[in-house]
Image (tube, grey):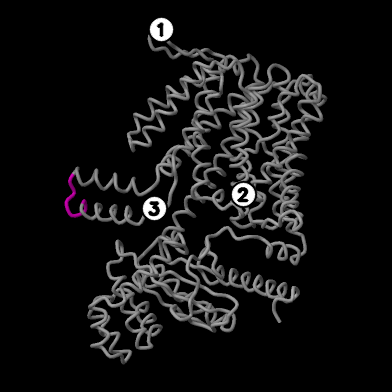
Amino acid sequence: MTRTAHRGSAHIVTSVPEVSDAYTGRTAWARGMAAALRTYLNTEVGSALVLVAAALVALVWANLPGGSYETVWTTDLSVRIGSWGITEDVRRWVNDGLMTFFFFVVGLEVRRELDMGELRERRRVAVPVLAALGGMTVPALLYLAVNAGGPGVGAWGVAMPTDTALALGVLALVGPRYPQRLRVFVLTLVVVDDIVSLVVIAVAYTRDLRLIALATAVLLFGVVYLLRFLRVWRGPAYFVVAVALWAAMLESGVHPAVAGVAMGLLATAYPPRRQRLERAVSLTRMFREQPTPEYARSARLSVDAAISTNERLQYLLHPWTSYVIVPLFALANVGVVLRPEVLSSAVRSPVTIGVVVGLIGGKLIGISGTSWLASRPRLGGLPLTVPFPQIVGASAVAGIGFTVSLFIADLSLEGLRLQDAKIGILTASVLATLLGWAAFQVIDRLPRSLVVRSAAATAPLIEELAAPVDPERDHIRGPDQAPVTLVEYGDYECPYCGRAEGTVRELVRDFSTDLRYVFRHLPLEDVHPHAELAAEAAEAAGTQGRFWEMHDLLFADQSALEPADLRDRAARLGLDVERFWDEVRTRAYARRVAEDVRSAEESGVAGTPTFFINGLRHQGSYDVDTLSAAIRLALHRSKLDVASRRAAGLER
């Protein structure tokens, strides 16, 4: 299919296969990671609406005459095997049973962030981690200050958590103009928030500890670890041991949520490995040639093996926990009888006041204040990952405690004080939403210079280029001393690279004095069988001083990359065709291409095209507008750096 695009005076015609627009603008691996993050965030946003609906239904149901709400949720339900069994009311089965799946997914999310996400970059993640800790400590202290010496003092943990689904959902509604990195900041913050909340649940709200049952649970957890060590990946084996572990934790007095998190933390996450991807493609092709049940099973297993267990389980369970389990938890726990005397009591209750003050004031002060202090030069000067005004807005939204706050309230309070805590949690959720909306409205009206100055000081949430640009080796377009360097890892047979080529030409033209462009090879042989040969042909042309001319011709017609096509291009460029073909035929530049591939792998690149701007990975779309904005920001930072160095006497 041929597509024509007009940008200014440029007229770009690209011949590429029909592809969904949902996949344009990102590298194969980055598209997958971005799509995973986008799916995660979209799930949270959608589930937030379901969660709110469930809470409203619970409130209406609880206030209907007849008392059917409590009748349903206090009905006993037993599970027995011989003489052994568990009897709990329906609400406890939801809170202690189904919510274990929720905390299992939390454990998976934490492990993914530790292995592949923001929690693996210590310096970049330092501010959101410290902000999360500050955003939990300050609310707890404010709650204790209000309830000091009172009967509700033990529920200080209620004011600490931030609800992941509601916070991200509200953020999407009140802060839609802000970039993805703000949502990543909040996501990192709530992951740390979840970790600390689980520690609080395990340590502060465990009662009647039974050591024999706890030892049994530890032994069963060791069995799970042994299965993982022995590389036993049979799901039923893990499920049986996990159920026994849950029962032992329930009997021990430690909340089974801890077992769910522990199981989730065992599931490692890792990027797709090239060898496994190639094996999956190979087996899929074999199935295409011989569609037998054996090849179908092998292809399916190889595709599954290419993705980490952590990501597969999240993909499977996250929608269930977000759309079913957590809303069901809200339905079972939010119901409060809103009689005038109950509301009158709640308004005066230290528990209600402490929860509202802790979640609203404590989160705002704790998160934004800690972030500001951590970024001060005298206190370490840690880099902010988003502009400070946006952190203030996010701090307001973080006052939505809801799910885990209700969970801790159920563990620590009962009777009228539990009702007061629920009213406080609901009130704080509404107020935090309104405060977040107001904060972002104010941010929208701040002077642009203030926001730009704040944005220039933020740290990018992207990987670094492992192999610095070498003018003696790399192929460069643009001035050698340009302040901004754009490096692309590309594949001559990749349709996305072909689409990006027109964008790159416009950038080189528009930033003629400020940008140098570097092209490096990353041929994806498993999906583009001619890409390796084309890359080596470009290098062979380069030895005769015509790399960029061959580069342009290869992208001009990506469907013609057979050996005869390459020889024809060499002739059109006036090259010594015999020398050119002899070098291509003997693969004289295979090592040169392999060096580029190795540098791509060391930089965490697995797909094409992938761009780095001044050594930092670009994660957004690669259209002209997006890349131009990123280059202008890099240029601005470069000028600020030069100015600061001159002020320090390091440059003239």
The kind of residue on which mark 2 rests is Ala
Residue 192 coordinates in the image, percent (x, y): 61, 41
Disc sitting over residue 172 in the figure: 2
Pick the quarter of the image with the N terminus: bottom left
View extreme (top): residue:
83
Disc sitting over residue 83 in the figure: 1
- Which region shows up in magenta? 287-292
The kind of residue on which mark 3 rests is Pro
Q: Is residue 356 visible?
A: yes
Asked if residue 570 is positioned above or below residue 35 in the image, the reply reads below
Q: Earlier in the sequence, mark 3 or mark 2?
A: 2
Q: How many marks?
A: 3
- Name the residue located 75 percent from the left edge and 22 percent from the top edge: 152
Q: Determine whether the residue tagged by mark 3 lies in a helix, strand or loop.
A: loop
Q: Are marks 1 and 2 in contact (CB under 8 Å)?
A: no
Q: Is residue 214 left or right of residue 208?
A: left
View extreme (front): residue:
650
- Name the residue located 34 percent from the left edge and 29 percent from the top edge: 236
- In the image, 527 versus 545, the foreground residue is 545
- In the image, 26 versus 272, the foreground residue is 272
Residue 581 coordinates in the image, percent (x, y): 24, 83
- Name the residue located 61 percent from the left edge and 42 percent from the top edge: 190
Q: Determine whether the residue tagged by mark 2 lies in a helix, strand or loop.
A: helix
The kind of residue on which mark 1 rests is Ser
Residue 13 coordinates in the image, percent (x, y): 41, 77
Q: Determine whether the residue tagged by mark 1 lies in a helix, strand or loop.
A: loop
Indicate yes or no whether the magenta region holds residue 184: no
Q: Is residue 258 left or right of residue 299?
A: right
Residue 523 coordinates in the image, percent (x, y): 35, 68
Q: Which residue is mark 3?
A: 272
Instruction: Give the Cα separation between the discs numbered 1 and 3.
Output: 48 Å
